[in-house]
Image: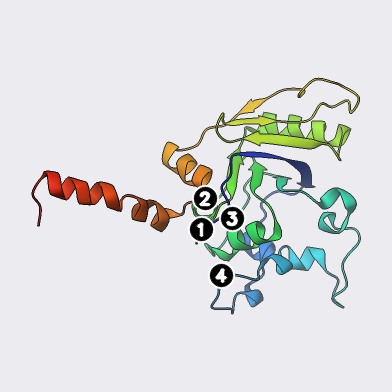
Amino acid sequence: MSFQPLNIITSPVVLLQAENIDTDRIIPARFLKSVESTGFGKNLFHDWRYRPDGSPDPDFVLNKPEGQGKILLTGKNFGCGSSREHAAWALYQYGFRVVISSGFADIFRTNALNNGLLPLEVTDQQLSGLMETYMANPLAAWTVDLNQQLLIPAPANQHSTSTGSFTVPFSLNSFRKECLLHGSDLIDYLAGLKPRIIQFEVNHHIK
């Protein structure tokens, strides 16, 4: 599945201050019956987001004014539990492009990168500082620069003219970075190599 290229994202931040959020919490299993890979965003965090009668819970962050943005800031060990790819689909289809945490489940990390979602991992100390920065100015926009591999939070003081209170460099596999920058999944990447493969065969007389 192709996705929108990700280069520089500047967006308000959504803070979901919980740890060990598993994939069933991200997208409950009862919503996985579709054979299509679309339509999951509406059920993201469903059991937190809606009351038993189906009405939105006004206390949940996605139902608040400060809960609208492309960057999700959350606690450690995000995406643990079952390996369902639907969790990444739901986050992306809701509108998130970046998830910031101090730890991701390995399979979730892979699923996210395969589907246009950047799992931006920081240290526990950095995460604590980022949450404090958010609390000081919750409606401010932060910037994620994938090309430079930098997270640039907004200033803690909303009247500051500086570009950011601090920057956080992050690491990312160069291949995964290239795919995100170009909006290419693994199949797109391989298909893009076809001209080079053909030329290699010609140069080496491969039939």
Q: Is residue 46 in view from this perspective?
A: yes
* Quarter of the figure with the C terminus: bottom left
Q: Earlier in the sequence, mark 4 or mark 3?
A: 4
Residue identified by numbered label 4: 37
- Of discs 2 and 3, which sits in the foreground? 2
**Residue 123 picture location, percent across and down:** 62, 32
Of discs 4 and 2, which sits in the foreground?
2
Type of amino acid under label 3: Cys
- The residue at the point 84 percent across, 21 percent down is 161
Q: Earlier in the sequence, mark 2 or mark 3?
A: 3
**Relative vertical location of residue 86 with respect to residue 79 in this rendering, above or below:** below
Q: Which residue is mark 3?
A: 80
Please give the residue where the numbered disc 2 appears in the rendered image.
183
Identify the image quadrant of residue 88.
bottom right
**Residue 150 position within the rendered picture, expressed as x and y whole percent measured from the top left:** 61, 29
User: Which mark sits nearer the N-terminus, 1 or 4?
Assistant: 1
- Considering the numbered disc 2 on the image, is that residue within a helix, a strand or a loop? loop
Is tag 4's residue or tag 2's residue first in the polypeptide sequence? 4
Q: Residue drawn 54% across and 78% down?
A: 35
- Secondary element type, mark 1: loop
Alpha carbons under labels 1 and 4: distance apart: 12 Å
Distance from label 1 to label 2 (Cα)?
6 Å
Marks 1 and 3 sit apart, C-alpha to C-alpha, by: 25 Å
Mark 1 crowdedness (10 Å alpha carbons): few <14, some 14-19, many ≥20 = some
Label 1 or label 2, whichever comes before in sequence order:
1
Q: Nearer the viewer, mark 4 or mark 3?
A: 4
* Residue displayed at 81% across by 64% down: 49
* 26 vs 206: above or below: below
Q: Looking at the image, is mark 1 or mark 3 earlier in the sequence?
A: 1
Marks 1,2: beta carbons within 8 A: yes
